[in-house]
Image (tube, helix red, strand yellow):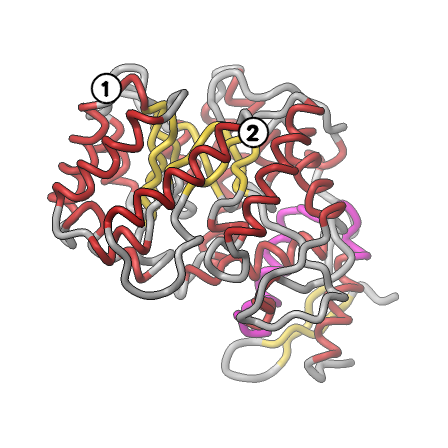
Amino acid sequence: MSARLLLPVAGGGLRPYTHRAEPAAFLAAAAGGAPAASRTVLAAAHVVADPYADTTPDGSAALDWDATLAFRRHLWAHGLGVAEAMDTAQRGMGLDWAGAAELIRRSAAEARAVGGRIACGVGTDQLAPGAHSLAEVRAAYEEQLALVEETGAQAVLMASRALAAVAEGPDTYRETYAHLLRQADRPVVLHWLGPMFDPALDGYWGSTDLDAATATFLDVIADHPDKVDGVKISLLDAGREVAVRRRLPDGVRCYTGDDFHYPELIAGDEQGFSHALLGVFDPLAPLAAAALRVLDTGDAKGFGELLDPSVGLSRHLFEAPTRFYKTGVVLLAWLAGHQGHFAMAGHQQSARSLPHLARAYELADALGLFPDPALAAARMRSLLAVYGVGE
């Protein structure tokens, strides 16, 4: 089959593209590497939908469990940890709490079997849409925290739409998180997810003023440093992350969630560095693992030379509206051969335009991310054909 494709461009028209002949050298290295020694790194993993299930966009998701768990084994094989049931797994955008709970149970069991690191999202998404009391929000958090800790996984206390809706100000957040942290059996990760990922979280921590919100966030950590393993900041603001990182108590990690500036934040500076919990490390796992092995040797320049070129792809996947980045992530998993179809929970495969998907393919191919570039091109060609694009 020809190596040439016609890719659509925004605004109309087609342009020729010739895919690369071979994958990048980092893919030739066998998986099975140990986790990075200098950084703690987790990839927020996507879920694989069951393409044969007769589901609706607003109904319960049906997952392909074999393919979903196989992808987690792929991440562990490259030495990355798995951040399970996070927003990359479509929490609140196709995956309901019943599905997330089953995902947590299955993935935690798989982690124990292979010796992989796992952390799981704790939220309040079992609550039905509408108004809820603060007591109901706390009870929902408690239910999910108990389930995660029962599986042996680490808990990630995620931002809650329900808490944002009911909170009367900073004190509501301080009291709610203090209540939860007192109950946690082991240190947790606190997750601050910005409104670019979920508009319902605007004003989280009690203020739309980020300086005021940051102060409340840091108050919670300072009051319970023994119960906070780290914080994940997803605001796409490198300067603010660095400022928070420098104010954390000793022993509390900063896990970058910044999919725009992750190489520089992980590399760090003379005053410190960030660990990582990133959705973009789902498609970038082999590249990220190779770069981290270089960083482990102390070669920050070599680390950047490997990982910096991936930022263009990440910025594209996470461009506004950022909450639909999962569509590009799943597209790349299909093109890379990790799953046999391009279908998503909640039918979110339609959330991005064809030009956006075509550009994601092109950027990933240029990086050498596809183990079989010809397979990726054939699958991309079949998607283009569905939209009426042909030679």
Residue 170 x %, y %: 13, 44
Q: Is residue 311 magenta?
A: no
- The residue shown at (76%, 81%) is 390
- The residue shown at (62%, 51%) is 47
Residue 30 seen anywhere in this rendered image of the structure: yes
Residue 273 seen anywhere in this rendered image of the structure: no
On the image, numbered disc 1 is attached to which residue? 249
The magenta region covers 351-375
Residue 145 x %, y %: 42, 35
Residue 186 x %, y %: 40, 20
Q: Is residue 356 magenta?
A: yes
Residue 151 - label: 2
In the rendered image, which quarter is residue 164 located in?
A: bottom left
Q: In which quadrant will I find the C terminus?
A: bottom right
Residue 146 x %, y %: 45, 33
Q: Nearer the viewer, residue 74 or 268?
A: 74
